[in-house]
């Protein structure tokens, strides 16, 4: 009887040890994968304007970034061409949700005026990005939109005041777009973007539906 009890205790002890080891391995794997998911590299830059291209961006965004770099590398920058391109890039990056890892992974932030950024992030997280599920481990099954074609419909210049800053020649850009799948046709498909001069840069201060 004693031998049987000892054997049972030994089996129970071994099972407990196995469960503990499996738990440690599971937690370690999650932590490792989480760290790996957070590792993002900068693969291209436009230093003068503070624009960075991350390796996590899509091929289409890489192409748009290259086009922007060509525009800004000219001796005399065509501002209308510049504002059209960053409008296109903002729309593509902000309204495409499928490549975002979580609701806090907000697109288009490179183009937002620093003084408006905090409010922009809070509003985006509480509205358009509110229901984006986490994809840190790459196992999300949630269907999310990707912007397909963008049309810049109109560009005008007006006096625009933001906080204590007034820009006599702020850019107002009207644009529309569609998505790669008709499933997302009910999502927002047009907007008016307001850009002000911020040194050499043009920065987004207002996004209107």
Image: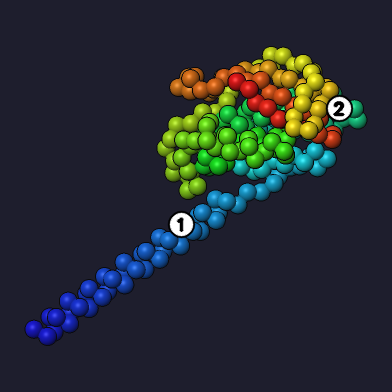
The image shows residue 80 at horizontal and vertical percentages of 80, 21
Q: Secondary structure at mark 2?
A: loop
Question: Residue 14 vs residue 90: left or right?
Answer: left
- Tell me the tag on residue 173: none
Residue at 55% in and 54% down:
36
Quarter of the figure that contains the C terminus: top right
Identify the mark nearer the N-term, 2 or 1.
Answer: 1
User: Which residue is farthest right?
Assistant: 75
* The quarter of the displayed image where residue 124 is located: top right
Residue 162, compared with residue 12, is above or below; it is above
Could you say which is closer to the camera, residue 91 or residue 114? 114
Residue 148, compared with residue 139, is above or below; it is above
Residue at 48% in and 43% down:
135
Distance from the alpha carbon under mark 2 to that under mark 1: 47 Å
Q: Residues within 10 Å of mark 2 (few under 14, many from 20)?
A: few
The image shows residue 50 at horizontal and vertical percentages of 77, 41
User: Which residue is farthest bottom?
Assistant: 2
Assess whether mark 1 and mark 2 are in contact (beta carbons under 8 angstroms): no
In the rendered image, which residue does mark 1 sit on?
30
* The quarter of the displayed image where residue 64 is located: top right
User: Which residue is farthest left?
Assistant: 1
Quarter of the figure that contains the N terminus: bottom left
In the rendered image, which residue does mark 2 sit on?
77
Could you say which is closer to the camera, residue 182 or residue 112? 112
**Residue 127 visible in the displayed image:** yes
Residue at 66% in and 48% down:
41
């Amino acid at each position: 009887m004693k031998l049987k009890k000892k054997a049972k205790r030994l089996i129970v002890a071994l099972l407990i040890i196995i469960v503990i080891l499996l738990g440690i391995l599971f937690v370690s794997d999650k932590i490792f994968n989480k760290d790996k998911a957070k590792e993002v590299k900068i693969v291209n830059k436009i230093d003068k304007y503070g624009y960075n291209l991350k390796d996590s961006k899509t091929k289409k965004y890489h192409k748009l970034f290259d086009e922007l770099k060509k525009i800004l590398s000219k001796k005399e920058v065509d501002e209308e061409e510049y504002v059209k391109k960053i409008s296109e890039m903002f729309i593509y990056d902000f309204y495409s949700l499928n490549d975002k890892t979580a609701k806090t992974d907000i697109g288009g932030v490179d183009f937002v005026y620093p003084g408006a950024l905090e409010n922009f992030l809070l509003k985006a997280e509480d509205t358009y990005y509110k229901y984006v599920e986490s994809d840190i481990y790459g196992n999300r099954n949630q269907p999310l939109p990707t912007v397909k074609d963008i049309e810049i419909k109109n560009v005008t210049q007006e006096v625009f005041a933001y906080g204590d800053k007034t820009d006599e020649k702020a850019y107002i850009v009207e644009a529309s777009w569609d998505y790669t799948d008709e499933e997302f046709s009910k999502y927002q498909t047009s907007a008016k973007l307001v850009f002000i001069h911020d040194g050499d840069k043009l920065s987004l201060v207002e996004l209107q539906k």
